[in-house]
Image (cartoon, helix red, strand yellow):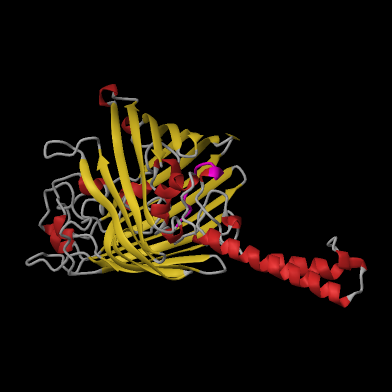
Amino acid sequence: MQRAFSLRPMAVAITLALGMGMLPCAYAANDDEAALRAEVAELRAQLIELKHEVQQIRATPASTAAAPANVATAASVATSATPASTAPASATSLPANADAASLPGAAPMQSSILNTAASATTLYGYGEMNYSRPTKDKSATQADLARAVFGFIHAFDENTRVVSEFEWEHAIASASDQGEAEVEQLYIEHQLQPNYGVRAGLMLIPLGLLNEHHEPTNYYGVYRNFVETAIIPSTWREGGVSMYGNTEFGLNWSAGVTTGPDLSKWDPTSPEGKESPLGSIHQELQLAKARDPSVFAAANWQGIPGLTVGGGIFTGKIGQGQPGFLANNARLLLGEGHVRWQTGPFDVSALYTRGTISDTENLNLTFIGNPTPVPKSFWGGYVQGAWRAWEHDGSAIAPFLRYEEYNTAASYEAIPLGLGVDPLVTSKLWTAGVNYWLNPNVVFKADYQQFRNESDRNRFDLGVGFQF
């Protein structure tokens, strides 16, 4: 991908060199005014010619071999609120409006994909296959083609594009199988100015470090972390309209109005709500009830090279005005904050998120006797460190260690004593493993997960992932 740059520093350098006699030009020792003017005119002509060449480069479609390798990341970076990659530095996609000083291993939030190609259509995709072996129950060992994803970006003109992503999960999707086929993203992006634009359609919500950068080459470990799966559901998407932008001092932002979850879908007999409260009631723009819109806002500051500090918030009523529904005033509020420091071979990050659902007491009274009422609060957080121990010619090895705590039902609205259920015990776990990038777009992974208070969940995992 071509980087945008300015001719101004070059012109200043040439001017200073001329004034100080640093260039080996004939007039350095010649006081003839006519000769000096001729030399200056010649240099001016060369600068104009160079400027035209740069303009031609900027107008040329980015169709080199390196561009397709990063398009999968670019599709999610299109709404990015976070660093885009943990892959080797050579794999990082640099948007045309990005500064290399903001690296390594990160792309600024809200970097428009409008510069990934100047015209026509670009195809991309990613996939992953996993193997998991519990230490206590070997009969539960599984191998899975977790997902296969394909997408395209089509440029209608230099400022307007459509971005799409289609996913198949668990190899087979049918009425009798557990697989799913879904549209993960489909939106129109229009760049209003070089530093801001607008999107409309089905978009990933820019919360956390993972939701928009969920390709297997972009995170440590075989599986996506629990906090950004159970609390911030992966891959959370809503339909709506949003704006994005960036500033010269490193602040990148995004805000929008979208659909929200539908609490009337809550099933108190299913464990799904305990696995992920929001994941169990998300709508994914499938005939989505949209009486009550939601809003979100997210921002990241990347003013220091390698450092990302940011957070976001999502809120809205989720009762959706259903006739007779007892929680039409229920409101979801989810917020998160994160920090990531990538310096030299080290990559350290931390994230905390907390959500609440209000006004659920009357609804939960109708769920008495069922195992899964609607929680009042849920939360999670993790810290993670990785070390790029070896890197050569596009390959890299990075061991990592992550500690997580999360609770999908930390509290419930008060109901009469003896009729409710107890809050869940907070899950606490360590994940230790290693990522090996065969090249920037193919990764092999291995890890071991140890749950401090749920030892029956301990497991050993293997995985392979790719993107193109």
**Residue at screen point 42% across, 52% down:** 74
- Which of these two is toward me, 447 or 1? 1
List x then y, in percent, for residue 53: 59, 61
Q: Is residue 69 in the magenta section?
A: no
List x then y, in percent, for residue 153: 35, 54
Q: Where on the picture, by quarter, is residue 355?
A: bottom left
List x then y, in percent, for residue 107: 50, 55
Establish if 65 lies above or below 252.
above
Q: Residue furthest bottom?
A: 33
- Side (left or right) of 335 relative to 331: right
- Side (left or right) of 353 relative to 390: left
Specify the quadrant that holds the C terminus.
top left
- State which region is magenta: 82-90
**Residue at screen point 23% across, 48% down:** 182
Report whether residue 238 is seen.
Answer: yes
- Which of these two is toward me, 352 or 111? 111
List x then y, in percent, for residue 255: 37, 68
Report whether residue 422 is seen.
Answer: no
Q: Residue furthest top?
A: 138
Q: Main secondary structure of the magenta part?
A: loop
Q: Where on the picture, by quarter, is residue 19?
A: bottom right
**Residue at screen point 87% across, 77% down:** 33
Establish if 253 lies above or below 139.
below
Number of numbered discs overlaid on the protein picture:
0
